[in-house]
Amino acid sequence: MRQPANATQGKFTDRVVLVTGGSRGIGRAVVLAFAAQSAQVAFCYHSNHTAAGALCQEAAASGWTVHAYQADVADPAQAEGFVAQAVARFGRVDVMVNNAGRFVRTPVAEMNPDEWEQVIRSNLYSVFYCCRAVLPHMARQGSGSIINLASIAGKRGSAYHAHYAAAKGGVLAFTRSLAREVIGQGIRVNAVCPGRVATELLLAEAGPDEEARWRADTPIGRLGTPEEVAAAVLFLAGDDAAYIVGETLDVDGGLLMD
């Protein structure tokens, strides 16, 4: 990414960052946070061309350049294609942020196999596919940082979202397992575990009563913001977290306090 002549150099200058599900919510905040720190950012989105274009325009208005690719990373070929296109453009990958996912409310008794499969694929298989695609490039460099977005649902469960919770629990186990495999190659793998964050995805699920209950249930007394989650992602991706491996950083307003 070519910065304007008067641009301030950030913590991620000349580093290449890939973000899945980057057009909205937490992913969008992550894209903008890395771009603000002078990273070269490529993000993928599933189908919302309008949101992806608006994000690119917003970044451009601040003097940053981000690159959008359409890809369904729950499909292995498309996940590999996203990574391949980014590597062809930039020549390397320094940070991989696996954020893409689906959040669907269905009781288990009413859940059909197709919905189970789709939610697991979107939230768990996509993480595997994208990690598998970037690992050879990071191994060749001898460095890299992978941050997987999980959820408190993966730790404590979530009624009416059993498929989502199962997938996010899988993300946490996968993160720890992969971290053990690849740290010897200079690749750090960690997870961020958001609580209830004020995104379109979550707020569409909640009516006023449910949102009030969520606030009351959270010790800090409010929902989180996508920017607060993005700040945790940036920390784990950066040099200040160089000794953090295989960990999960909860950003949940105290929901999981012992």
Image: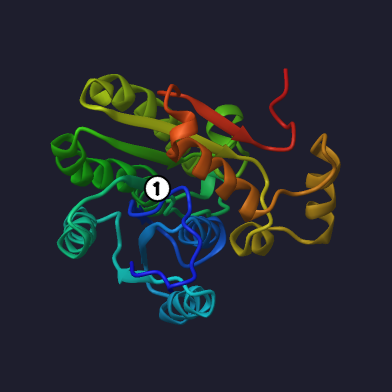
Q: Residue at x 62, y 54 (%)?
A: 226
The residue under label 1 is 97
Q: Quadrant of the N terminus?
A: bottom left
Which of the 4 image quadrants contains residue 171? top left
The outermost residue toward the front is 6
What residue is rendered at 26% in x and 49% in y? Answer: 93
**Residue type highlighted by circle 1:** Val
Count of numbered marks:
1
Where residue 194 appears, as percent x and y from the top left, is 60, 41
Q: Is residue 258 above or below residue 194?
A: above
Q: Which residue is rendered at x = 47% and y = 60% of the image? A: 31
**Colouring convention used in this rendered image of the protein:** rainbow
Q: Quadrant of the C terminus?
A: top right
Q: Nearer the viewer, residue 10 or 159?
A: 10
Q: Badge 1, how many Cα within 10 Å: few under 14, some, many 20+?
A: many
Instruction: Give the vertical position of 135 relative to 18 (above or below).
Output: above
Left or right of 116 in this view: 140: left
Most foreground residue, 24 or 158: 24
Residue 51 left/right relative to 90: right
Q: Is residue 188 above or below residue 61?
A: above
For the residue pair 117 and 83, the one nearer the viewer reads as: 83
Taking 45 as reference, is 246 above or below it? Answer: above
- Where's residue 192, x and y in %? 52, 37
Element assignment for label 1: strand
x then y, percent, for residue 103: 52, 53
Q: Position of residue 45 (x, y in %)?
A: 38, 67
Which residue does the image show at 48% across and 75% down from the upper left? 63
